[in-house]
Amino acid sequence: MGTVASSLRGAGGGGGRGGETVLGDLPESCVAEVLLRLDPPEICRMARLSRTFRGAASGDGVWQAKLPRNYARLLAAAASGNGGNEEEGRHAAAALEPETIPKKEVYARLCRRNRLDGGTKEFWLDKGGGGVCISISSRALSITSIDDRRYWNFIPSDESRFHTVAYLKQIWWFEVRGEVDFCFPEGTYSLFFRIHLGRPFKRLGRRVYNSEHIHGWDIKPVRFQLSTSDGQHAQSKCYLTDSGAWINHHAGDFVVKNSNEPISVQFAMAQIDCTHTKGGLCVDSVAVKPQCLAKKKASRVYV
């Protein structure tokens, strides 16, 4: 506390009274070395201490260390809205000239909700850890019989980042598939299906849910699976029993070794035992997150 107080007294960046040394007297290069060891939110808080800290916290060297190695591709994807693996993305990157943009601004841009494929997909940089996450709307998924209103409907929802979810009333053959091609930074990623048993809605300002159509999920398990273009496979299964809440069901993990090449990830959720019907399920989206971020949040994991 005494050190921080001294730094505030010397906020102008000059020496302290009577020869007292304060934080503002530290060379900016030394402050930058300290900031390199902090998370982005901590860097922003430290920037409030003095002009020296503020200058160091705006330096390219600090923020480049927090950016993914393929940040130029991600910036192109954010500008073109196509995932960063098309000719249009290269033109967008050239137009932006990412090397001329302050790295702090690049970090801020990537932390926004960057839309892809007409707004049916979004990616962003996690503000705390710097990992890349992507979310895929139910409208971007291939759902069996989705166009038959006897079985499925798209309903509005303020609990979805896409403001729409797919609601299943009843069906015999339940199958949801999807695919994403993206230049993920190197690392291990987890894939989740975000689903909800029952239909949530508001009544007199309070959140409630309709359980009228919920049935069939406790008879046979739902199977989750994923595969990648470089030959990785993962699968899991579980019974759907928790109603009234959004649950992230873990489908599996995959590893990205080359951040400069797009990887294709195919995923599916199915319960195709036609001896019984099942229904009363909302499908919101599919999320891909760095494994380290996924473990920080409560998600249902099954084997």
Image (cartoon, helix red, strand yellow):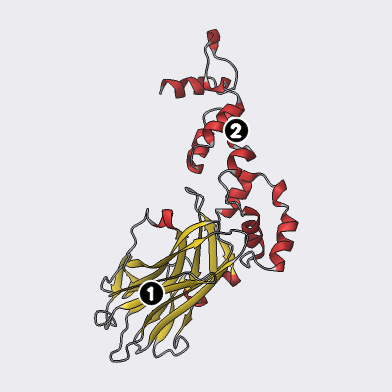
Q: Where does residue 300 sit, x and y in percent of width and height? A: 32, 64
Q: Nearer the viewer, mark 2 or mark 1?
A: 1
Give the side of residue 138 with respect to residue 97, left or right.
Answer: left
Q: So how many labels did they put on this image?
A: 2
Quick check: 69 above or below 173? above
Does the residue at mark 2 contact the one at mark 1 (Cβ under 8 Å)?
Answer: no
Q: Secondary structure at mark 1?
A: strand
Q: Residue at x 41, y 74 (%)?
A: 225
Q: CA distance from mark 2 to mark 1?
A: 47 Å
State the mark number for residue 4.
Answer: none
Which quadrant is home to the C terminus?
Answer: bottom left
- Indicate the amino acid at tag 2: Ala
Residue 282 seen in the figure: yes
Q: Where does residue 260 sit, x and y in percent of width and height? A: 62, 59
Disc 2 crowd, CA 10 A, few/some/many (<14, 14-19, 20+)? many
Q: Residue at x 55, y 23 (%)?
A: 11
Q: Where does residue 61 sit, x and y in percent of width and height? A: 62, 39
* Residue closest to the far front: 231
Question: In the depicted view, which residue is nearer to us: 212 or 130?
Answer: 130
Q: Residue at x 55, y 60 (%)?
A: 184
Give the side of residue 186 with respect to residue 99, left or right.
Answer: left
- Indicate the amino acid at tag 1: Phe
Quick check: 97 above or below 285? above
- Residue designated by label 1: 224
- Residue designated by label 2: 56
Residue 200 seen in the figure: no
Q: Quadrant of residue 287?
A: bottom left
Which quadrant is home to the N terminus?
Answer: top left
Disc 1 crowd, CA 10 A, few/some/many (<14, 14-19, 20+)? many
Give the side of residue 295 with respect to residue 47, left or right.
Answer: left
Q: Secondary structure at mark 2?
A: helix
Quick check: 60 above or below 31? below
